[in-house]
Amino acid sequence: TFFFSAVSEMFIKTPYKEEASHLGDDETEKASFSDAIAHIKSIKGFGSLLVSILFINFAVSPLFSVGIVYLFNNILVKPAMDLAITNVVFSASTLIAGIVIGAIKLKSSGATIRRFIALLTLGFILISINIALVMNGITSYPVFYILTLVLNLFMGVTIIFVNVPLNTGMTKVIAPSYRGRVFSLTGALSQIAMPVSLILSGFVIDNFGIVSLAGVCSFLAIIPTVVFIMNKNLRHLFEGIDHANSKDHPEPIATEAV
């Protein structure tokens, strides 16, 4: 699949325009960083969107990257194949959901994102409850494992129905000349937040246990979900994306100061 992806990308033609700069390398990097920040601030609701996305990643990543792996390998002590199958189910569900969402026309990107963000958080909370039940001996391992597969399938679908319209909307919101700088900035912030969340997750597991980690992560995931649903600036941003997606207004949406 990587090979075919590389071949397909050979046919992408991107216009290139070199811009002359009289600044040094360090000054150019600072100017690019400042421009990215200024452009984010110029789009109403976009700052809230980025903070919410980073917060969700910070809340969800520890349980999936560390907690569940630790649960299967160190606490339940199950074969590696059991954990591998859960990952395969998740990946397969994202693939199928990607095909489905690519074949349908969404009436409202904003409504879809808000609805599936809520469902994503619900699925995450159910995963945490499932972990708590098996850890306290309320459910057996087979029941836990079947529920894990079902919830991984559910999470894979909901993530795609959030990510695809969200990434498409972000691309429409950002002016072409700023996209590289803005996405580089958000990527850097994600990379900074990820190690911190993983270190904290290890501390919580060692001192309080896997159930406590699941509870903390679920609570933290609720906060950005409420912001996505209730924040007026985000609603304005999503309305602008829907406006840009309409047939009568196919052009990118204009920026607006906060």
Image (spheres, rainbow, N blue to C red):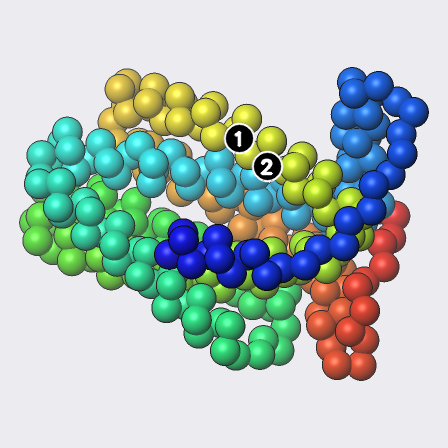
Q: Quadrant of the N terminus?
A: bottom left
CB atoms at circles 1 and 2 under 8 Å apart? yes
Instruction: Determine whether the residue tagged by mark 1 lies in a helix, strand or loop.
Output: helix
- Residue 170 is at least partly visible in this image: yes
Instruction: Work out which residue is located at the far bottom of the displayed protein and give it.
Output: 248
Q: Position of residue 211 (x, y in %)?
A: 26, 35
Taking 103 as reference, is 169 above or below it?
above
Q: Look at 84% across and 19% down and name the residue there.
A: 24
Q: Position of residue 105 (x, y in %)?
A: 58, 79
Q: Looking at the rendering, which quadrant does residue 68 occupy? A: top left
- Circle 1 sits on which residue? 191
| C-alpha separation, residue under disc 1 versus residue under disc 2 | 6 Å
Q: In the displayed structure, does residue 90 sit left or right of residue 252?
A: left
Label 2 Cα crowd, 10 Å radius (few <14 / some 14-19 / many 20+): few
Q: Is residue 239 visible?
A: no
| Residue located at (15% from left, 52% from top) | 145
Q: Residue at x 87, y 53 (%)?
A: 256
**In the picture shown, does residue 153 fall above or below 200?**
below
In the image, what residue type sits under mark 1? Gln
Quarter holding residue 76: top left
**Mark 2 falls on what kind of element?**
helix
Q: Please indicate whether residue 197 sits to the left or right of residue 130 in the image.
A: right
- Name the amino acid type tagged 2: Gly
The residue tagged 2 is: 187
Q: Position of residue 252 (x, y in %)?
A: 79, 64
Q: Residue furthest right?
A: 22
Residue 13: image tag: none
